[in-house]
Image: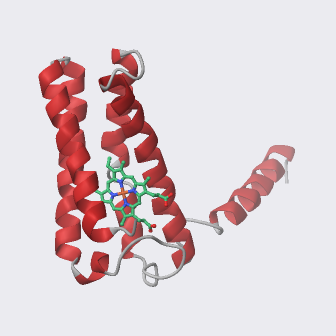
């Protein structure tokens, strides 16, 4: 083996063992994954909220970046709800996520559409349209949590 191929082999071994730890090898992993995704959703959404409410100076570049991140992040958590056994353990998801799954998926889709719309209008800079799209997005958070998440 050359020195560089040995380095490559060592690297593959190292990353292989890291990969074996995550991405849904267990129900607990799936729960953590979606919770972490929701934390990032909250960070991005909360920062936009602070700017819209004047709790923080409006920075339209930052706002657009947050909106773009949110539109991407809105797709991230939902695959992890499909992992068998992830209805139990350290989760705040209610049983209704699985018993009323069509409705859960419908609200998830509305959330994704609303956040894509928010990213789209943010780039345009129309304040009313931004406020409206932000409100619709926030309603989907609350609408889902009311029915599918423990307080
Ligand atoms: C389609 C349903 C749905 C939508 C839409 C949704 N959430 Fe959630 N959210 C959940 C569920 C279910 C959980 C519980 C996840 C778990 O504990 O396994 C959760 C958990 C959370 C958590 C807690 C994460 C943790 O660390 O345990 C935060 C924060 C959160 N959501 C914020 C938001 C915000 C902000 C929005 C909107 C911008 C949003 N969510 C939209 C269903 C949703």
Colour treatment of the image: secondary structure
Q: 100 or 30: which is nearer to us?
A: 100
Q: Quadrant of the N terminus?
A: bottom right
Q: 35 or 73: which is nearer to us?
A: 35
In the rendered view, would you say 101 is above or below 128? below
Identified at 15% across, 18% down, the residue is 126
Q: 84 or 126: which is nearer to us?
A: 126
Identified at 22% across, 52% down, the residue is 140
Residue 19: x, y in percent? 63, 63
Q: Is residue 125 left or right of residue 85?
A: left
Total numbered labels placed on residues in the image = 0
Q: Quadrant of residue 44?
A: top left
Q: Is residue 126 left or right of residue 35?
A: left
Residue 18: x, y in percent? 69, 61
In the rendered view, would you say 44 is above or below 95? above
Q: Quadrant of residue 42?
A: top left
Identified at 56% across, 74% down, the residue is 28
Residue 151: x, y in percent? 40, 65
Identified at 22% across, 58% down, the residue is 143
Q: Quadrant of residue 68?
A: top left
Q: Is residue 86 left or right of residue 60?
A: right
Q: Is residue 92 left or right of residue 60?
A: right
In the rendered view, would you say 112 is above or below 143? above
Q: Quadrant of ligand 1?
A: bottom left
Residue 5: x, y in percent? 78, 50
In the rendered view, would you say 32 is above or below 99? above
């Amino acid at each position: 083996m050359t020195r560089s191929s040995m380095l490559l082999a060592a690297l593959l071994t190292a990353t292989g063992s890291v990969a074996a730890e995550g991405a849904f090898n267990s129900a607990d992993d799936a729960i953590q994954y979606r919770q972490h995704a929701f934390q990032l959703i909250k960070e991005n959404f909360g920062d936009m909220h602070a700017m819209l409410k004047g709790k923080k100076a409006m920075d339209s570049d930052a706002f657009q970046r947050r909106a773009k991140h949110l539109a991407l992040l809105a797709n991230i958590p939902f695959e992890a709800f499909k992992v068998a056994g992830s209805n139990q353990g350290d989760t705040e998801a209610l049983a209704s996520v699985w018993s009323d799954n069509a409705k859960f998926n419908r609200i998830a889709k509305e959330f994704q559409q609303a956040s894509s719309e928010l990213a789209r209008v943010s780039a345009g800079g129309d304040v009313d349209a931004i406020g409206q799209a932000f409100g619709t997005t926030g309603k989907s958070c609350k609408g889902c949590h009311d029915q599918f998440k423990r307080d």
